[in-house]
Image: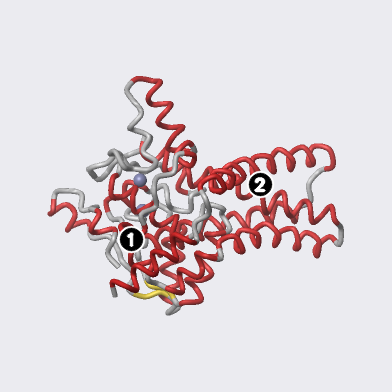
Amino acid sequence: MEEKTLHLRETARASLPASGLVRLIIHLVVWLPTAGVVGAVALAWSRGVDAFALVLLAAMYILTVMGVELGLHRLVSHRAFKAHPVVEAILVILGSMAAQGGALYWASTHRRHHAFSDRPGDPHSPHLHGAGRRGRLAGMAHAHMGWLFAPVEADWLRFVPDLVKDSRLFTLHRLYFVWLLLGLSGPALLGLLITGSWWGALEGFLWGGLGRIFLVHHAVWGVNSLCHIFGSRPFATREQSRNLFWLALPSLGGAWHNNHHAFPRTADNRLRWWQFDFCGLVVRLLERAGLARDVQYADEAAFRAAGKNKDTPDMVMEG
Ligand SMILES: [Zn+2]
Ligand SMILES: [Zn+2]
């Protein structure tokens, strides 16, 4: 087993591009979607926008935020449920189309966040940048986007040893750039097929591809930045996580972030009838359809009885 693990580690490391290339990719991933939004709005201003482009934007947005929140986050990072292999592949591919890194990168960064939440070592805490208004603003900027440009070492054997050994998941991870390109070329191709024109292909690319990635980025990053600063804290967890109701809809349930830190392995963040969690609803439907099993749900009574946050590194690394 030891030898196999070492081999897998070498394979994993060999799959990481050189650091200069990584930096270039991060800049492209952040600024190309921003340029895409500017281009889409400018073209819409001069030529108008077709309804199909807005439908593509909405559909691709919902699918890829779900891919991140339900796939990369709840399924892969927290193992909150077990999915049928086809469902797992679809969710990971959709999550990869969000341009937030391959599944193992995403999960190792996120498990590190849970292991060090709002303490040194947390990759995107807004609380480690000094006191006063300046420190708070710097912290918020770091937690939202700045952290991407200061990547910490992945250390996969520490944070995702279970995922490195999962050959199916590892293959999906290695094909990350294929999924990313599919998420950009797919909407362009649909635009071409629907309108029969190159203008339609460009609209599909800008609205369903780049513009959609821009919106997905800020919704997901908003959970990292805003949900550790603003909102309510029904659970006295050891970090500063919060439930931010207005972000719950665009994040498809991810913004019930205090609920999540209190119960990191739950597949459904909805703990009160009014807390709408789209991804929680989807996982319950998958469970009913026999496509998800071993679905984890929150045990509030146990949490209160323990009187402390059980979100420990050991817990998030359970296989
Ligand atoms: Zn958090
Ligand atoms: Zn989490």
Quarter of the figure that contains the N terminus: bottom left
Instruction: Report whether residue 274 is seen.
Output: no
The residue most toward the right is 197
Q: Position of residue 98 (x, y in %)?
A: 56, 54
Q: Which residue is mark 1?
A: 157
Q: Quadrant of residue 24?
A: top right
At horizontal 47% and vertical 77% (from top left) the residue drawn is: 85
Using residue 79 as the reference point, say whether residue 187 is left or right of it: right
At horizontal 35% and vertical 65% (from top left) the residue drawn is: 79
Above or below — where is 104 with respect to 141? below
Reading the chain from its start, which is encountered first: label 2 or label 1? 1
Q: Which residue is mark 2?
A: 211
Q: Position of residue 182 (x, y in %)?
A: 65, 62
Asked whether the beta carbons under mark 2 and mark 1 sit within 8 Å of each other, the answer is no
Q: Secondary structure at mark 2?
A: helix
Residue type, numbered disc 2: Gly
